[in-house]
Amino acid sequence: MERLTRRKVRVGSVVSDKMTKTVVVRVERLVQHPRLKRTVRRFKKYKVHDENETCRVGDVVSIMETRPLSKEKRWRVVEVLKRQD
């Protein structure tokens, strides 16, 4: 059953899986430079909860915002979209 609340969803790639039940996901977004009017890539890294520890470095995953799970973890893995071979 889908909830009425709108949670943020992002797609990014896993850059680290060294922690227990936690992965670091790098999300890319495109923004227009205010003066140059040119498209620029911006990146942000999120610490994401991975309950089953299924994600590996290089995987493309979908993440969803959730309640605070630790000091820096506020996201969880929804699904693995593409596996790194």
Image: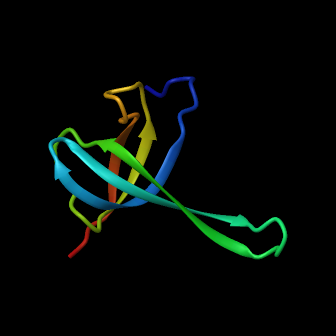
15 displayed left or right of 36: left
Say whether residue 80 is visible. yes
- Viewer-proximal residue among 10 and 28: 28
Residue 72 drawn at (x, y percent): 37, 35
Q: Quadrant of residue 78?
A: top left
Residue 3 drawn at (x, y percent): 50, 24
Residue 66 drawn at (x, y percent): 42, 30
Quadrant (top left, top right, bottom left, bottom right) of the C terminus: bottom left
Compared with 78, 18 (above or below) is: below
Q: Residue at x 33, y 43 (%)?
A: 48
36 displayed left or right of 21: right
Compared with 36, 57 (above or below) is: above
Residue 31 drawn at (x, y percent): 70, 64
59 displayed left or right of 45: left
* Colouring rule applied to residues: rainbow
47 displayed left or right of 36: left
Say whether residue 54 is visible. no
Q: Which residue is drawn at 76% across and 76% down?
A: 38
Q: Report the label total.
A: 0
Quadrant (top left, top right, bottom left, bottom right) of the N terminus: top left
Q: Residue at x 33, y 50 (%)?
A: 79
Q: Quadrant of residue 56?
A: bottom left
